[in-house]
Image (cartoon, rainbow, N blue to C red):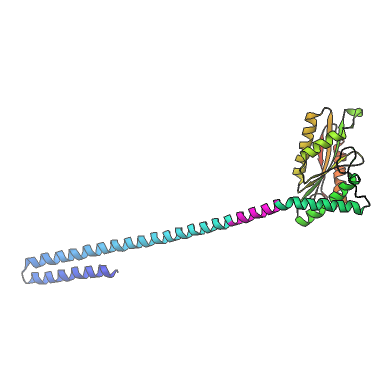
């Protein structure tokens, strides 16, 4: 029992006893005083219980408030941590973007070294197609080697696309004007992508940091621009991606060639994607 309530009750009981003793001596006022004292003690006891209940409720509310403050503090700390993580990622992204041009330049230089190692001269004519100004087949194969090597180091995808663009219908089909196609390729592709023309008149693309769906969308953009602005144009394309379809350069180019062959079986525009090995 709360000591405050015990004191009040003791005072009331003492007054009551004294009042009874006084009554036994014949004093009516003593009875009244005893009853009043007992009533005062009971009232004090009730008030004390109410105060105790109030204090208990306040303690519960204070504990809940502390818990809320702790939760808010944790949320603020989590937000600060998240903001720091976002800031760190932003700085990393900015750094990556700043070095992207340098990395592309290094890859291009590596490609040129690969071409020279294969016995080509240092002249630009050794790595470009005379009809379009695009890179030639030697440069394409070296580019695939360099891009796949870089992708393997940085764990990024690379897409290889072989395209055939013809004009006319049926047996009257012939290769579309190379320079026109080349202009559309250059206007559509990114600076980090590589566009080449092979000795068979095919257009070979190397799309850096591009998965399968991105490669298909890129070819579709090229196809739309060609077919919307040029008449009687048919575009066939085969797409393969590292590492989804192949890990080796030879297999990657081979799968793109197989996909292109499957696309040319259609009379209309067609984009085929290579099938990964089971």
Total number of numbered discs in the rendering: 0
Residue 105 location (% of width, % of height): 79, 51
Determine the residue positioned at 75% across, 40% down: 217
Residue 96 location (% of width, % of height): 70, 53
Residue 153 location (% of width, % of height): 78, 57
Inspect the magenta stretch and tell me whether residue 239 lies in it: no
Above or below, comparing residue 62 to residue 177 in the picture: below
Q: Which residues are magenta?
A: 84-97
Quarter of the view holding residue 135: top right
Q: Is residue 180 visible?
A: yes
Inspect the magenta stretch and tell me whether residue 89 lies in it: yes
Residue 109 location (% of width, % of height): 83, 52
Determine the residue positioned at 22% across, 62% down: 43
Determine the residue positioned at 8% across, 71% down: 24
Left or right: 227 in relation to 24: right
Above or below, comparing residue 92 to residue 215 in the picture: below
Q: Nearer the viewer, residue 59 or 126?
A: 126
Quadrant of the image containing the N terminus = bottom left
Q: Nearer the viewer, residue 61 or 92?
A: 92
Left or right: 82 in relation to 132: left
């Amino acid at each position: 029992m709360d000591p405050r309530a015990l004191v009040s009750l003791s005072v009331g009981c003492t007054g009551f006893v004294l009042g009874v003793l006084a009554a036994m001596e014949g004093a009516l006022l003593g009875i009244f005083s005893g009853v009043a004292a007992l009533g005062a003690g009971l009232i004090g006891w009730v008030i004390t219980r109410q105060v105790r209940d109030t204090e208990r409720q306040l303690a519960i509310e204070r504990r809940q408030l502390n818990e809320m403050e702790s939760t808010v503090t944790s949320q603020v700390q989590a937000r600060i941590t998240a903001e720091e993580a976002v800031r760190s990622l932003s700085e990393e992204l900015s750094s990556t973007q700043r070095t992207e041009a340098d990395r592309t330049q290094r890859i291009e230089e590596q490609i040129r070294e690969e071409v020279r190692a294969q016995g080509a001269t240092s002249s630009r004519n050794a790595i470009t197609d005379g009809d379009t100004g695009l890179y030639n087949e030697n440069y394409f194969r070296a580019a695939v080697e360099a891009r796949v090597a870089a992708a393997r180091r940085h764990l990024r995808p690379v897409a290889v696309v072989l395209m055939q663009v013809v004009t006319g219908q049926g047996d009257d089909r012939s290769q579309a004007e190379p320079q026109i196609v080349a202009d559309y390729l250059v206007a559509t592709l990114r600076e980090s992508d590589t566009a080449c023309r092979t000795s068979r008149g095919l257009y070979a693309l190397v799309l850096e940091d591009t998965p399968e769906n991105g490669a298909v969308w890129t070819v579709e953009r090229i196809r739309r621009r060609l077919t919307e602005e040029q008449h009687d144009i048919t575009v066939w394309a085969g797409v393969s991606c590292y590492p989804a379809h192949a890990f080796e350069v030879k297999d990657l180019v081979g799968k793109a060639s197989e996909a292109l062959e499957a696309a040319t079986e259609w009379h209309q525009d067609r984009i085929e994607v290579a099938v990964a090995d089971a």
